[in-house]
Amino acid sequence: MPASLTRRQALTAAFCLCCLPSRLRADAAPRAQPAAFQEVAPGIHIRRGVDEDATRANQDAIANIGFIIGRDAVLVTDAGGCLADGQALRAAIRAHTGKPIRYVLLSHIHPDHIFGAGAFLPDNPTFIGHANLPQSMAARGAFYQSHLDEILGRQKSGPLVRPTLTVATMQTIDLGDRRLTLTAHAPAHTSTDVSLFDHATCTLLPADLLFVGRIPSLDGSLTGWIAELAALSKLNAARAIPGHGPVQMDFSAAAALLNHYLTALRDQTRAAIASGIGIDKATMTVATSERKKWALFDDYNSRNVIEAYRELEWE
Ligand SMILES: [Zn+2]
């Protein structure tokens, strides 16, 4: 892979991270319906995404998405990977409750988390995102949308819905006897990461700040991600709901595995830079000892090394 990518290649690499394939698989066999929503804690319902890249067959239903029901209202997070995914999520909500859908949290810029938001426009909710999200959507949104349309074919991605409330540091919202704290993070998985903490059940929803089983994708800051993981561990959450992987995990155990990969990526990239090893060669060696631990490793690790190299060579 060349050391210097074109702008289009760089964008493609960026949004392929956890989201979209580098090649189309439109003729893949139809898959079984996605798993049903599970109530992982009282009032928190989550659908597990499949551990794949987006295809026409899976309809980009690859992220863990769900909703939280309070006394008075519902919050959605995330919105789903395309309009149909969002519509299925909305139908699942309506099967559980008739309470108003008052908030839709868009945890970060990646397509598998945001393109279902159009399904909730009729509810007129507050769409919440990181303070950097509008700028990131302006830079990448149209490109993401056209590429996702290309993958999904006649079933279009859905509209790009922009946040109507942005979070720069922290924001608390109340669903009625249910307080939720939203935290806008420094660049980590992306530069637009927002996590959610439900005080009623001590449940952390870190979105893609936590990957389990599927290789994490770096699209923000490697050193920042390691730091944000350490900060989240101080919440002592009773459970965490990863953006990808099982619908609930012990945060410490899952974060330790992720931290092991990120630390290997950081330390081995630094060593490669210090030894004068070029970025191309580094992609073939750095963190490869982690290969057997992560699904889709060969699809993402070299991209992660490129991102890490570019960040760390300026230290
Ligand atoms: Zn992501």
Image (cartoon, rainbow, N blue to C red):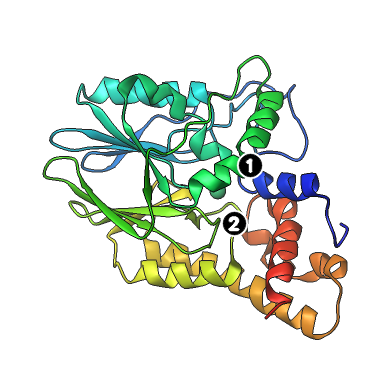
Label 2 sits on residue: 216
Secondary structure under tag 2 reads loop
Q: Is mark 2 within 8 Å of ligand 1?
A: no
Q: Work out whether residue 36 or residue 193 is closer to the camera in this orientation and state it.
A: 193
Q: Position of residue 143 (x, y in %)?
A: 68, 35
Q: Work out whether residue 35 or residue 96 is closer to the camera in this orientation and state it.
A: 96
Q: Pointer 1 and pointer 2: residues touching (CB < 8 Å)?
A: no
Q: Is mark 1 within 8 Å of ligand 1?
A: no
- The amino acid type found where label 2 is placed reads Pro
Residue occupying the point 48% across, 69% down = 256
Report, in whole angstroms, how far the alpha carbon at label 1 lies from the one at label 2: 20 Å
- The amino acid type found where label 1 is placed reads Arg
Locate residue 140 relative to residue 189 in the image: left or right.
right
User: On residue 140, which mark appears?
Assistant: 1
Q: Residues within 10 Å of mark 1 (few under 14, many from 20)?
A: some
Task: Identify whether 1 is placed above or below 314.
Answer: above
Q: Name the image quarter holding the N terminus.
A: bottom right
Q: Position of residue 63 (x, y in %)?
A: 51, 40
Task: Identify whether 93 is placed above or below 12.
Answer: above
Q: Residues within 10 Å of mark 2 (few under 14, many from 20)?
A: many
Q: Position of residue 60 (x, y in %)?
A: 58, 31
First reached walking from the N terminus: tag 1 or tag 2: 1
Task: Identify whether 227 is placed above or below 107.
Answer: below
Locate residue 197 relative to residue 5 in the image: left or right.
left
Residue occupying the point 59% across, 74% down = 263
Secondary structure under tag 1 reads helix
Residue 307 in view? yes
Locate residue 30 relative to residue 37 in the image: left or right.
right
